[in-house]
Amino acid sequence: MIKERNVLVEAALGALAGAAAAWVMGKVTSYLYEHEDQQAREREDAARDGKMAYGVAAEKVAELTGRELDEDQRQQYGSAIHWALSLGAGAAYGVMRDAVPLAGWSKGLLFGAVFWLSVDEVGSAALGLTKPPQAFPWQAHARGLAGHLVFGIATEACFQLFDAHE
């Protein structure tokens, strides 16, 4: 029987799971990108105007504080935003996990799909961090979905390990 954990513990475990899941997701999406059709990669790169969404987010935050970022700072702060989002998403998963009436891996897959849809497909464009989804080739969407499904599965896998060691 699994002992109940309090919300802070669930959030902390979720943040750890989110960090692990982000690392795994990064490996998977990098591999997929490197093996993608060259024309699709070029179309995606053109749609990004040479900038990743997290770098654009870093620029927007810097603008709010009256600062300008150089390329290194944009990448560094963009990476920090990416990791913060991953830890936050993992923490949210940890807190909400037991409220979802699905079993095991289904929870992780649902989480990954919702995370992809809300961040990659809707949120980034709505916040002005990327062009709208139709500006990107289907391969970019498929890779993003695959990556986020992996994120969800890896997050759930961490929680299954946490649960098994109680």
Image (tube, rainbow, N blue to C red):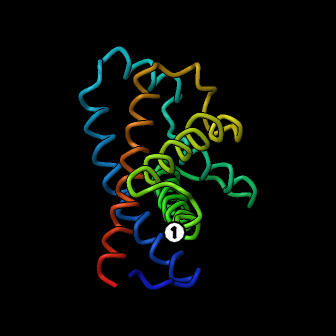
> Residue at the spot x=54%, y=75% of the render?
11
Return the residue nearer the eye: 74 or 113.
113
Query: For the N terminus, which image quadrant?
Result: bottom left
Residue farthest top in this picture: 39
From the top left corner, tell me how far across and down residue 102 is, in percent. Answer: 49, 54
Q: Position of residue 135 (x, y in %)?
A: 57, 20
Q: Amino acid at mark 1?
A: Gly
Quadrant of the drawing holding the C terminus = bottom left
Q: Is residue 75 left or right of residue 165?
A: right
How busy is the neighbourhood of tag 1: few (under 14 within 10 Å), some, or many (20 plus)?
many
Q: Identify the residue at horizontal 35%, vertical 63% (top origin).
A: 20
Describe residue 54's horizontal placement relative to residue 38 as left or right: right
Residue closest to the eye, 67 or 97: 97
Q: How many marks?
A: 1
Which residue does the image show at 63% across and 26% down from the upper left? 132
Give the quarter of the image for residue 125: top right
Left/right placement of residue 129 relative to residue 22 reads: right
The residue depicted at 58 percent of the width and 34 percent of the height is 121
Q: Position of residue 126 (x, y in %)?
A: 71, 37
Question: Furthest residue to the front?
Answer: 1
Residue 99 on image: x %, y %: 59, 64
Toward which corner of the image does residue 2 lie, by quadrant? bottom left
Q: Which residue is mark 1?
A: 94
| The one of 49 and 39 positioned closer to us in this rendering | 39
Residue 161 vs residue 53: left or right?
Answer: left
At numbered mark 1, what does the secondary structure look like: helix, strand or loop? helix
